[in-house]
Structure formats: structure tokens, C-alpha cells
Image: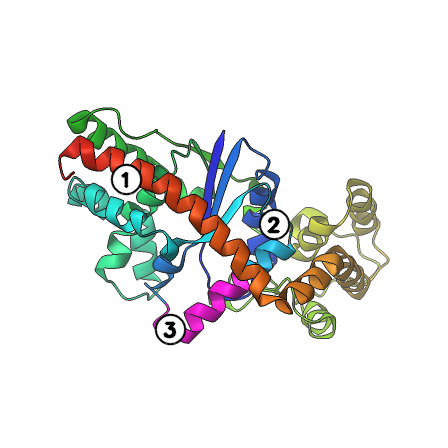
Amino acid sequence: MRVLSGIQPSGHAHWGNYFGAIKQYIELQYADSAFYFIANLHALNTIRDAEELRANTFDTALDLLALGLNPENAHLFVQGDVPQVSELCWLLLTGAPMGLLERCVSYKDKIAKGQKANAGLFAYPVLQAADILAYDADTVPVGEDQAQHIEVCRDLAQRFNHHFGEVFVLPKAKLLTATAKVPGIDGEKMSKSYGNHIEIFEPPKPMRKKIMRIPTDSRPMEEPKKPEDDHLFQLYSLFASEAGRDEMAARYRRGGFGYGEVKKALADKAEAYFAEAREKRADLAAKPEQVREILAAGGAAARAKAGEVLRRAQEACGVK
């Protein structure tokens, strides 16, 4: 199994990023081969400040390494350090039907949310297809909102293979688990764009203040409550053991407690859960050259594999 996944450098990772994706990426790094990239080319669709993009890219590398991505198990690299992917993207674009891209719901959703339309955003699925196909990846972990893009990737690969021979491996999506929809402090899906997120490496004191301000209903302390309907309980469940979740759920159903107790328990669990990663991140931040060396080594491995695939595609279609 060869795993491929990317994450956009949109700033510091939050709980939703971790439990919705990063945690599961890290669990998959022990595949036969794994490539993980920081998608700085995709980020250009929204970030138009060079220094911000560079800083976010480095911060994302710190986050991933601190949270457990091991460069001895997986290749970690920056998307823009592999120019072969951009060349491959052009080969795929020449055979990409406009109608196929127009039907992509991700593009429509982003425009509906106010993101400016541009050709890069429209062609996002084609660059994503190049990201995947460049490494002969057969397994791509994605959330439901990205599953359609894997189908687009397969479609583009099949069209190319039909015209020029069996060049590309057809990947399969590995849908991430239900925790991909981590609730924010307002109960909606946690997202930076909604301003309802809690950063993984947020200092403990501000994190606790944010948790204590989570809105709850006004039911009296003695009244029983339904844990399955409460986003505060859902957040607590991310960090608690199965026994801890069951115990807290039983307290909800019995009643006789205040939400402040749950908030304190959540803050304690979250702080302890990320304590080791927070310490590791601080250590890595003090050794930037070590992080750059890891990215450089990952980039070299990625270029070698992508170069092999690009040459195969170029020879097949006649540009080499």
C-alpha cells in the first residue's frame, strides 16, 4: 500500500484538523510507502502574501512532526519543491473535460462561501490529481468533502491511460472516520473560517479561557441531560478513554452537575493529551535547520519518484 496525502499550510492546526485528518494520516504512515506533502501551491489560491505562506509552510511542518509524523517512516516534503507535479498537471489538463471540473462541488461551495473565483481554484482537482498520480499512490485518505476529487483523479488517469497506454496507477479513496466533523466551540464544524476553533498548540491559559466560554444550554444542574446532543460532550469524547466517555455520559443522564465541571475536565484532558507534542514542537522550533533537512530529504525522494512517473507519461504521450 502506498499512501499519499497533503495538507494546506493555512496556519496553526486546530483540534478539527488533528482528529479529522492528521491523527489518521499519522496512523497510516507505517504503510509500505507513504508520501505526505505541505500543499503550498494549492494555498496560493487564498494566500497572497509570500512571507505568510513561507511561515505557514514551516509551521505546518513543525505541527506534523511534533504530532508524530516520523520522517523515517514517511516522506514529508513541500509540494512546490517537486516541479514534476506541475508539469504532470499540464499533461492532465490537456485532457480534462470542462464539464467534469464544473461539476466539482468543492469549487461551488468555496465560491458560495465568498472565495474569489480564479483558474487555480477551478483547476484545483487537476493539480490534486497530479499530486496523487506522481507517486503511484494507491491509497488516499480523504474526508467526504474531498472524495469527489479522487473520482476526478481516477477519471483523468483512465482517460490518459485510454489514449496513451497504462501509465498511471488508479488510486482509491480511504474515507476518514466520522471524527472528521469535529464540533467547534459553537457546535458547528470546527473551522478557522468560522472562528470557532481551538488550536492544538494554543498556550494552556488561553485554551482554558476559550473552553470555559463554550456556550451551553440553560437547563438547571439537577436536570438530566443527553450527552449525544451536546457538543461539549463530543469534544470531551475526543480526548477521553472509552471508560471515561461512558462515565461522563452516565453523569449527564443522572444530572446533578454543572457544565463548568465538564469544561474543566475537557481542558485538563486536552492539555495532557497534547503536552508531549507541545514540548516536541518547541524543541523542533529551536532547531529550524533540522526541520529544513527533513523537508529537503523528503523533497529529494519525492522528486525521484515523481520524475520517474513524469518521464513515463511524457514518453507515452510523445512530448519526450
Task: Say which residue appears at 57% left-offset and 49% top-offset.
Answer: 22
Q: State the residue in front, 64 or 125.
A: 64
Task: Say which residue appears at 32% left-offset and 37% top-offset.
Answer: 308
Percent coordinates x, y for residue 200 in the rendering: 64, 62
Mark-to-mark CA distance, 1 and 3: 28 Å
Query: In what element is the residue under mark 3?
Result: helix
Q: Given this view, does label 2 or label 1 mark the residue nearer the observer?
A: 1
2 and 1 marks in contact (CB < 8 Å): no
Q: Which residues are magenta?
A: 47-60
Q: Given this view, does label 1 or label 3 mark the residue nearer the observer?
A: 1
* Residue matched to label 3: 50
Name the kind of residue labelled 2 in the image: Phe
First in sequence: mark 1 or mark 3? 3
1 and 3 marks in contact (CB < 8 Å): no
First in sequence: mark 3 or mark 2? 2
First in sequence: mark 2 or mark 1? 2
Circle 2 Cα neighbour tier, 10 Å, few/some/many (<14 / 14–19 / ≥20): many
Tell me, for residue 310, which label it has, or none: 1
Image quadrant assignment for residue 66: bottom right
